[in-house]
Amino acid sequence: MRMTRYFLPVLKETPAEAQIVSHRLMLRAGMIKQSAAGIYSWLPLGYKVLKNIETIVHEEQARAGHHAMLMPTIQSADLWRESGRYDDYGEEMLRIKDRHDRDMLFTPTAEELITDIFRAHVSSYKDMPLTMYQIQWKFRDERRPRFGVMRGREFYMKDGYNFDLTKEDALHAYNRHLVSYLRTYERMGLQAIPMRADSGPIGGDDTHEFLVLAETGESEVFYDSAVTELTFGDREIDYDDHAQCAGVMEEFTTKYARTDETHDEALFNEVPEERRRVARGIEVGQIFYFGTKYSDALGATVQGPDGKPVAVHMGSHGIGVSRLLGAIIEASHDDKGIIWPEGVTPFHVGIVNLKQGDDEADAACDSLYAQIEAMGLEPLYDDRNERAGGKFATMDLIGLPWRITVGPRGLKNGVVELTSRKTGESEELVPAVAIAKIAEIYGKS
Ligand code: ATP
Ligand code: MG
């Protein structure tokens, strides 16, 4: 993409209404624009990152064997009356009436609807286990929408639902989700720590939240610092292997890590003092096992192997897709702007032309641009007639992990400059070597 053709409305001033750094940077980098409290338009740069995050979630869900689907945002109140949640959900539910005066609502989550689909189509144990998920807009009329996309009213969420014949199978589904979430967050350059949590209005006993440590997080968390040393990496997992998934679950959840809702001071004190940490975290996902709560309420039974009806065991599992943009920025920025991890960056490489209109510099930039595109990567070329300082400031603000700087002086010696946004380190390289390095970084060589 050439910057002169792009829509990138960066702001010079720091917006006064934004209280935390991710919100400020998303507004300044022209990623989002508020349209009403807690409701945002996603401008091209923000939308690109949102889609990248969504793609990673889809890929990891597919790897775990879960089926993507899509349910409507507007639902009839009837099913929610059946489960009892129409009244229980409270003021966070946006209630709407259609022209026939029927009660409708904007979905805050979708346990009822998915259970209705299941009960309509699945009648035998032979069609299980089954896990389906969607990535869809949700609406919750939060009391205090704030911090930009971190606590919106309209937000983008992955919500998945497993249906299993037995508790044992459903607990495997729970473990499988935990494993797939660990991979998902790591691919986004994030460490998200599973912590024992409270189930709240969804109900159920087993639940973990995934938290990204950040000073601006809304949750108070208590943990053994040894949990921050665990990484999932690129280990091979057979998602059908109960013992293997249970092993990962144990590895990542045995050490003390809890939110304030489930914190137990006596247990915490058993952690060696030098490893005890009290900090703040951003909740980027949650997994639940809630047994037969919804299948009982909505009559979702299947015929078991012995011919008798069995209520199915369920769980639900969410990832805050739009919140993740804020969480990633909170975890990865400096005083100049965002530092995107390579896995989610909106463009792979920025190209800065120090002398727009200089034949040689223009030709070198065009050539780099074409080579980067030919690798299947996306460059963002700052081809504006601006001073170098302004171009660098924009690139630093929008946070592309790699920048190639091209100028007449370097070209005289046959070199361009490759700069890492994260370390700030630059190398002078002949263009072909710079391209080879980019290929290596993004696994294209
Ligand atoms: P919270 O405690 O932050 O209100 P929750 O526990 O009610 O969230 P879940 O029902 O578990 O949320 O939803 C799954 C995920 O969706 C959460 O882990 C979070 O990342 C995200 N999420 C929830 N509410 C919001 C919101 N208002 N804005 C943006 N993301 C949200
Ligand atoms: Mg939650």
Image (cartoon, rainbow, N blue to C red):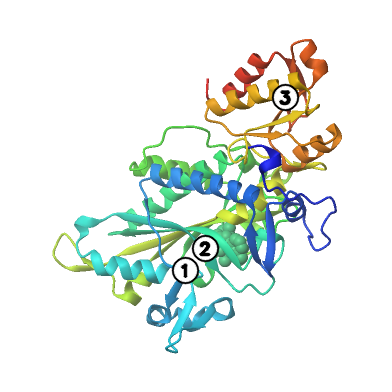
Nearer-N-terminus badge (2/3): 2
Type of amino acid at the residue the image marks with label 3: Asp
Residue 409 in which image quadrant = top right
Indicate the position of residue 61 as horizontal and vertical percent values: 42, 47
Q: CA distance from mark 2 to mark 3?
A: 43 Å
Which label sits on residue 362? Answer: 3
Kind of residue at disc 1: Thr
- Above or below, 396 against 256 in this view is above
Return the mark for residue 73: 1
Locate the N terminus and report the quarter of the image it occupies: top right
Q: Dividing the image into four equal quarters, which quarter contains ligand 1?
A: bottom right
Q: Earlier in the sequence, mark 2 or mark 1?
A: 1
Residue 262 visible somewhere in the drawing: no
Q: Is residue 153 left or right of residue 54?
A: right
Badge 1 element: loop
Is the C-beta of the residue carrying label 3 under 8 Å from the nearest atom of ligand 1?
A: no
Front position among marks 3 and 1: 3
